[in-house]
Image (spheres, rainbow, N blue to C red):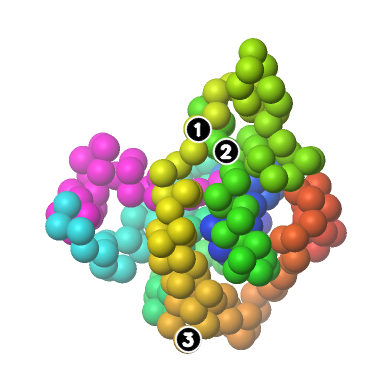
Amino acid sequence: MNILAFGPNGSGKGTQGAIIKEKYNIAHIESGAIFRKNIGEGTELGLKAKEYIDKGDLVPDDITIPMILDRLKEDDCKNGWLLDGFPRNKVQAETLAKALKDEGMDLDYVLEIVLDREVAKLRIMGRRLCVNDNNHPNHIAFDAIKPVEKDGKLVCRVCGGDLITRPDDQDEEAINKRHNIYYDDTTGTMAAVNFFKNLEGTKVISVDGTPSIQEVSETIMKELP
């Protein structure tokens, strides 16, 4: 089972991806990790990507998509995969769809977690990251996933690990910049979502990201085999 996951920053997409990975024994692949791995290992594609990144430029799709396809061919993807963080715009969606088809890779589901933009921003600014596992949900504004207090400080509610905040999570300008790309339904990520919604043979699962993690997960699981 191969899944493409969409959702704005703050929607809980990474958490739901981890739950799906555990239940279905498929690989949860985050696009940023693909870049880091290729650059760290000094692969040919990684070195090419680094040239663009070092200059502050976007890595072209003719480098990014081959890296993604190489990752999807690795052994841990034999049972299936969930790709998270790519494509980010309509052109990338069209290019990825063609590349998957050319490689004979089926795209079984497109998962879209729908969340109001202002709610998504509040979630980002209140989230705290566990140093042991970023997928341990901790948020200062939601009782169900509030960190716990230990020795006068807040720690991860799942494992008791230290919590940190990403600097860009507290930067409203940076958040707005990311969300401007995601919520753009003309050329941005929402345009990519809409492209897949109209792509014949692909089942789209759209779920409301507002309820609790468990409720969202249960809704998703009802749609998956």
- Say if mark 1 contacts mark 2, CB within 8 Å: yes
| Residue found at x 75% / y 65% | 208
The residue segment tinted magenta is: 28-53
The residue pinned by badge 1 equals 164
Q: Which secondary structure dominates the residues rendered in magenta?
A: helix
Look at the numbered disc 1 and give the secondary structure of its residue: strand
Tell me the kind of residue under disc 2: Arg
Residue appearing at x 53%, y 41% in the figure: 76
Mark 3 to mark 2 CA distance (whole Å) = 32 Å
Q: Residue at x 65, y 41 (%)?
A: 139
Q: Which mark is residue 128?
A: 2
Q: Considering only order in the chain, which callout, 2 or 3, is on the residue closer to the N terminus?
A: 2
Is residue 56 at least partly visible in the picture? yes
Q: Position of residue 126 (x, y in %)?
A: 60, 46
What element does badge 2 sit on?
A: loop
Q: Quadrant of the C terminus?
A: bottom right
The answer for how far apart the CA atoms under marks 1 and 2 are is: 6 Å
Three-letter amino acid code at the position of disc 3: Thr
The image shows residue 12 at horizontal and vertical percentages of: 64, 52
Locate residue 56: give its quadrant.
bottom left
Residue drawn at (21%, 40%), measured in percent from left and top? 42
